[in-house]
Each structure stands twice: as structure tokens, then as C-alpha cells.
Amino acid sequence: MKIELVNRLVMFVSLLVAQVLILNHVHFLGVGTPLLYVYFAITFRRNFPKWLVLVSCFLLGLLIDIFSNTPGLASSVMTIAGLAQCYLMNLIAPRDSAEDLAASIKTLGFSKFATLSGFITALYCILFFAIETFNFFDILMWLARSLVSAVLTMVLILAIESVRSR
């Protein structure tokens, strides 16, 4: 259990640093920004305490908010992503699997992991840009930002997970 907490802390800090120093400055086609820190919410084990998932997702979002000048935006949507992961993991994981099943390509398989991470990433990007824009007058730009950011984020998540699962 202590090794897992150390691994989670290292992932927390590395995703925070990568997002703040590198990925916040990447704007693909002028509309898409990879939001890789959502990967933190995706990778929790099935029986990890829900309160700890929500608190750690909120703290990561809060730190992203502080360094990215988006007050309350990332923290609120990261909390929703953590909550969604708790329930989606139970739906996607096999019923006869272990209670401490971690969300990864190695344990779930590529298709189930891609489904889980794709749904959480899409939910995150749609909510993030809907709250950021806070109007639907330019709905095409909102959809473009959500779609391009979700695709960029999924590509990065699957690339990291494929390296990590070896």
C-alpha cells in the first residue's frame, strides 16, 4: 500500500509539472490543448477509497488552476472525472476480476481501457470547455476545442499507458 501511495504521488507531481510547464503551451491547430492530467483520475484501482479519489483529483485540479490561472475550473471538472471513474470502473471491469483491479492496458485489455479512458476524457473535455466558455453562441468552436483536445489527450494517454504496461 505504501509503494502505491508513493507511485501515486510521483504520478501526481509529474503530471502537474508536465501540464503546467509544457502542455499548457501546446495549442494544436489553435484550438486543441492536451489535458494529460486527467490520466491521474483514470488510473485509480477499483477498491481505492472514493473519498481519497475525490480529494486527490480535487487537489490536482486545484494546483492546475493555481498555475494555469483558471480559478475553480480544473478542480471542479477533475472532481467530476474522479467520481465518474469510480462508477465506470465497476461497469467496465469484469465481474469476476479482483477487487483491487487497476485501470491499465495490462489488466483491462486495450479495448476496455480505451473505452474507460475515452469516456472519461471526453466527459472531462466537454465539461472543461463548456464551463470555460460559459455560453453556446459559438458552439462550433466549443465542439472543435472539445474534440481536438480529447483526441490529443487520448493519444498521449494511450502512448504513456502502452509504455507503462511493458
Image (spheres, helix red, strand yellow):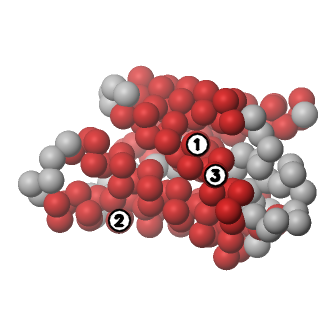
- Amino acid type, residue under disc 3 in the picture: Tyr
Q: Circle 3 sits in a helix, a strand or a loop, which is it?
A: helix
- Amino acid type, residue under disc 2 in the picture: Leu
Task: Point out residue 77 in the picture as x, y percentages from the top left corner.
Answer: 44, 40
Of the 4 image quadrants, the one containing the N terminus is top right
Which numbered disc flags the more N-terminal residue, 1 or 2?
A: 1
Task: Point out residue 166 in the picture as x, y percentages from the top left corner.
Answer: 83, 65
CA neighbours of label 3 inside 10 A, class few (<14), some (14 to 19), many (20+): few
Instruction: Name the residue beneath numbered marker 2.
Output: 147
Q: Residue at x 26, y 41 (%)?
A: 132
Looking at the picture, tell me which residue is in the foreground, 161 or 80.
80
Q: Nearer the viewer, mark 1 or mark 3?
A: 3
Residue furthest out toward the left: 137
Q: Residue at x 40, y 53 (%)?
A: 125
From the viewer's perspective, tell me whether residue 47 is left or right of residue 162: right
- Amino acid type, residue under disc 1 in the picture: Gly
Q: Residue at x 56, y 49 (%)?
A: 84
Looking at the picture, tell me which residue is in the foreground, 35 or 14.
35
Residue furthest out toward the bottom: 111
Which numbered disc flags the more N-terminal residue, 2 or 3?
A: 3
From the viewer's perspective, tell me whether residue 161 is left or right of residue 156: right
From the viewer's perspective, tell me whether residue 138 is left or right of residue 109: left
* Marks 1 and 2, how far apart at CA: 20 Å
Q: Nearer the viewer, mark 2 or mark 3?
A: 3
Task: Point out residue 129 in the picture as x, y percentages from the top left corner.
Answer: 30, 49
Which numbered disc flags the more N-terminal residue, 1 or 3?
A: 1
Task: Point out residue 149 in the picture as x, y percentages from the top left corner.
Answer: 39, 59
Instruction: Name the residue beneath numbered marker 1.
Output: 82
Instruction: Name the residue beneath numbered marker 3.
Output: 87
* Marks 2 and 3, how far apart at CA: 23 Å
